[in-house]
Each structure stands twice: as C-alpha cells, then as structure tokens.
Image: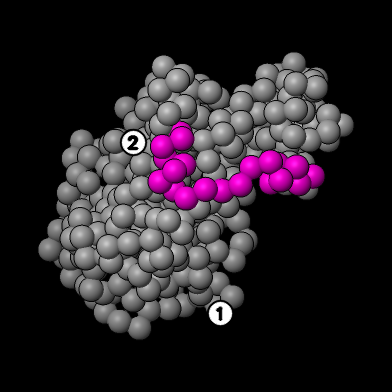
C-alpha cells in the first residue's frame, strides 16, 4: 500500500456511556495501515472526554487525539460537528492523505478500515471515496418492536435488490457489483483532495453526509460502495438529530404495509433512463428515446447532455423529471414487500 497519512474523525457529544466501546473497536483494527484517530468532543455535558483520555492512557499504542470544543450555537449540531471533525482530520492528513468518518455510537468490525481503504489504496485506482455497510447492533435490533424489525428486514432486502438491479442495468465502472446502497457518515472514507474538491461538508440543516456524497457525484469524483467494510451502530428510537436513522426507525413502527417505496417498474425505468443519459452525455447529444425514458421533453434534457460533468448532467435530468411531473403521474409508490417481490422478479428475468 502506498504511504499516506490516514486519519479517522469521530465527532462526539454526550457519548460517555459508549465512546470507549467505539474507541476499543478502532484500536482493534487488523491489517490496516497506520492511522490516527481524532475525537472531537463538542458542547458535551458528560464525561466523554474523561472516558476517552482514560482509554488512551490504557492503550498508548493507539494514536488517539482528544479535543474538546465549544461550537457556536449555529454550529453546535451534527452538521457543524461533522464538518469540524473532518476539517481537522483533513488538515492533519495533508493534501495526499485520506480522511475517514465514523460515529461515536458505532462499532467497527476488526477488518473495517482495511476493507474501507482497499478501493482507495489499490494501485492505479481512480476511486476518490469509499462507503461501507452500516448495520444495527444485534442486541439492539432484537429489542426493537416487531413492526420495526419486520420493516427493517424487508427494506434491507429491497435496497439490496434495487442495488443489484441498478448495477446490472446502469453499471458504474468505478462501483461494480457486488456493491451496496449506503453512503453515510458512520462509514465513509475520502481522499483529502476529493474532500476539498467537493467543498467539504455542505452547509445544510441535516443529512450532511448525503449532501457530501451528492457533492462528490456532482464533481464526478467516483465513490465505491464496499460491502465488506462493516460497522454496527446504535438502534436508538430517539435520536439526537432532526433527521436520521432514528427518524427512519420511528416511521417503521407502523409496520411494513405502511412503508411505501418505488415499485419494480419505476426502479427499472429510472436505471434505464440513467444509462441512456450516460450514453447521450458521452455523445453530447440528446435523443427522443432518452426523453421518453425520463418522461420529459427533449428540450429539457439538451442542457443536461451539454453539462461539463456527468454528475451535473444527472442532477439536471433529475431536476427536469421532478419539475415536469409526468414521472409522478405515471409511477406511484407501493408497500415495501410488494416492491421487493417486483424487483426480485425483474432480476430473475434479466439473468
């Protein structure tokens, strides 16, 4: 593996009860190149810092930096904390380095880091970011209400099937199968150069990790979804952010029959539309066939195919699809169990 500085950034606030387990998992990484861990504790009222420093004294071989900060009110949230932690890590790693993001309530598998970094450190790799799988901790998942567990299992199967269908219909050379569908701050690695090119963590009110991934896509900075890089996170029903995993779990309490997602026909059409857009963008010309797939006028797609980057073209095409409204008049969401059956049937047909 080439030499570069690798820094894992962990924002934390009032995580005294679990931060040692998170640090222990990071200290137990096997096969990974040398790395540092930066724990940014912001606006905390408990003993998170004391717990972390006590662990550092017990494990002197583990390179841990603990920093306590009081972020201003506008920044004292998960977005500001993630930005501060990743900015600090990027400055520490340097222009040729790699920053890795995880959470203080998340436990990494022993091979998480080596697997997460593998696409970035492979010789000649053009991959600029890597996203790992995020699973619920087994004991917390088992304690969830029955409707939440059932919906979670069906949704996971559905997302996996959709990912496989999309990989078959609209393949990405930098993100081939097997891949997955998650790209969140609990398991994400980026080259510092890509982090800078994307503009860092965007100024959004929530879901800053998804906004960062969208910025990478907009800049045509390839991201690899790495199935073997796994972390296990808390299944808290009462979260600490306005929108996040706890929000999702809360919505699932109504049961799978109330959780509606795009059906098989819509998933297939969107994958076909994106594949057609890629071909037209490469040829720098639109076509009636592509407009028919997107259910938009050809004129609305002309600007997209002239975009300087494919990520921008894709963003503009989706904006046109949303604005014109024909898509939503044609397709309606369906219960997740039905959607899963439809997507699996399509996969069998395409074999």
Residue 35 location (% of width, % of height): 30, 45
Residue at (69% x, 41% y) in the render: 330
Mark seen at residue 227:
2
Q: In front here: 248 or 284? A: 248
- Circle 2 or circle 1, nearest the eye: 2
Q: Nearer the viewer, residue 108 or 81?
A: 108
Which residue in the structure is indicated by mark 1?
A: 73
Question: Is residue 80 visible in the rendered structure shown here?
Answer: yes
Residue 26 in percent (x, y) is at: 24, 52
Q: Say above or below: 159 vs 202.
A: above
Q: Residue at coordinates 67% horizontally, 23% vertically from top-left?
A: 276
Q: Is residue 200 visible?
A: no
The answer to whether residue 334 is magenta is: yes
Q: Main secondary structure of the magenta part?
A: helix
- Start-end of magenta stretch: 324-343
Colouring mode (rainbow / by chain / secondary structure / one colour)? one colour
């Amino acid at each position: 593996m080439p030499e570069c500085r690798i820094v894992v950034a962990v924002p934390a606030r009032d995580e005294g009860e679990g931060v040692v387990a998170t640090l222990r998992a990071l200290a137990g990484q096997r096969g990974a190149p040398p790395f540092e861990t930066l724990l940014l504790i912001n606006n905390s009222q408990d003993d998170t810092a004391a717990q972390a420093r006590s662990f550092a004294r017990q494990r002197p071989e583990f390179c841990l930096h603990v920093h306590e900060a009081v972020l201003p009110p506008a920044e004292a949230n998960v977005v500001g904390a993630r930005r501060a932690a990743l900015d600090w890590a990027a400055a520490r790693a340097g222009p040729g380095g790699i920053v890795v993001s995880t959470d203080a309530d998340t436990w990494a598998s022993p091979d998480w880091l080596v697997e997460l970094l593998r696409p970035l450190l492979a010789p000649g790799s053009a991959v600029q970011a890597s996203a790992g799988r995020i699973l619920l901790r087994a004991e917390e998942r088992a304690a969830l209400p029955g409707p939440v567990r059932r919906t979670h299992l069906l949704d996971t199967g559905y997302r996996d099937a959709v990912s496989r269908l999309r990989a078959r219909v609209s393949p990405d050379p930098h993100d081939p199968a097997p891949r997955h569908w998650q790209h969140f701050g609990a398991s994400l690695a980026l080259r510092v150069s890509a982090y800078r090119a994307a503009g860092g963590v965007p100024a959004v009110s929530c879901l800053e990790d998804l906004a960062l991934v969208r910025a990478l896509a907009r800049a045509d900075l390839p991201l690899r979804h790495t199935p073997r890089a796994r972390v296990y996170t808390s299944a808290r029903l009462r979260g600490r952010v306005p929108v996040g995993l706890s929000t999702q779990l809360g919505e699932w309490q109504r049961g799978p029959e109330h959780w509606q997602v795009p059906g098989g026909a819509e998933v297939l059409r969107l994958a076909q539309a994106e594949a057609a857009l890629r071909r037209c963008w490469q040829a720098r010309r639109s076509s009636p066939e592509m407009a028919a797939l997107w259910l938009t006028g050809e004129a609305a797609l002309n600007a997209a195919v002239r975009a300087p980057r494919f990520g921008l073209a894709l963003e503009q095409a989706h904006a046109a699809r949303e604005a014109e409204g024909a898509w939503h008049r044609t397709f309606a969401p369906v219960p997740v169990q039905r959607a899963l059956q439809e997507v699996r049937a399509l996969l069998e047909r395409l074999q």
